[in-house]
Amino acid sequence: MPMLIAKALSVERSGQQVLKDVSFQLEQGEIHALLGGNGAGKSTTLLTFLGFLSPVSGSAHVQGRAVSESVSAARQAIAYLPEAATLYGHLNAYENLRYFLSLAKTETHRKALDAALDRVALQAEAREARMQTYSKGMRQKVAIAMAILREAPILLLDEPTSGLDPAAIDDFNRLVRDLAESGRTILLVTHDVYGACHVADRIHLLHKGELVGTFDRPSGMDRIDTEAVHAAFTTHAAA
């Protein structure tokens, strides 16, 4: 059973059509990237899977069930990481995790918190420090640890590497691959061609709300053809 399906999905915002007949699906353990420039409809797609936007035609499905039938079930299955993760600067990593997980009615113990923070490679000495002292990459690690602790089978990531340095991007991509190999299904949106090609199993290229290209990682290869994706991206950006 596919974990996420967009079926001829069309969505309007403020009276303007933002998505036009977009279709794709993700199986368990796959990483797909929605690639496109500003206004392509990438974040709108995520918000539709979360039930914050309703399609004017077509449908979005989470674990085989239309989001319109049960928004709560869709959100229960999804951990969403926005571009700027909302964490409290005056709290440390443990306190942020405990607070937000309590809102999701998820009980955690210190051992479980440390196991998740170990998995995202957040230094032990940083965990008691206030979040306001963290770099963006460190804050992203805490947010991903929260998604791990929630045990949601699907992750939606909105521009997850925006503002990160190259080393932090490589760390993040390795973590995402590890999560997929453990069975998580991941849909991320980005305008970073290079990063998408290195982390995704499949790229969906969006332009002005339309799906204009799909690129797969060849069997036995460690990335999607960057030159092919870049050429398509720039061609449509110039149109």
Image (cartoon, helix red, strand yellow):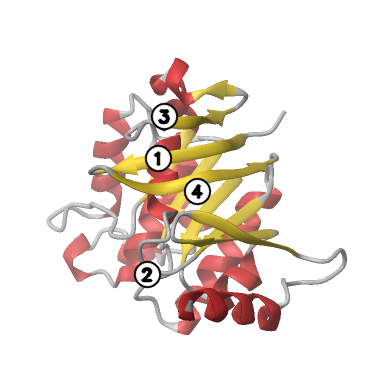
Neighbours of disc 4 within 10 Å: few (<14), some (14-19), many (20+): some
Q: Which residue is mark 2?
A: 137
Q: Residue at x 32, y 34 (%)?
A: 52
Q: Which residue is mark 3?
A: 75
Q: Amino acid at mark 1?
A: Val
Q: Choose between 140 and 227: the one closer to the eye.
A: 227
Q: Amino acid at mark 2?
A: Gly
Q: Which residue is mark 1?
A: 11
Would you say 161 lies left or right of 172 here?
left
Q: Choose between 213 and 114: the one closer to the eye.
A: 213
Res 7 visible: yes
Up the image or down, 7 lies above or below 105; here it is below
Label 4, label 3: how many angstroms apart (C-alpha)? Answer: 24 Å
- Relative image position of residue 215 (x, y in whole percent): 71, 64
Q: Which residue is mark 4?
A: 115
Q: Amino acid at mark 3?
A: Arg
Instruction: Of the two numbered discs 1 and 4 on the same chain, state the one appearing first in sequence.
Output: 1
- Relative image position of residue 231 (x, y in whole percent): 63, 82
Up the image or down, 115 lies above or below 3; here it is below
Instruction: Of the two numbered discs 1 and 3 on the same chain, state the one appearing first in sequence.
Output: 1
- Relative image position of residue 191 (x, y in whole percent): 46, 70
Q: Are marks 4 and 3 in contact (CB under 8 Å)?
A: no
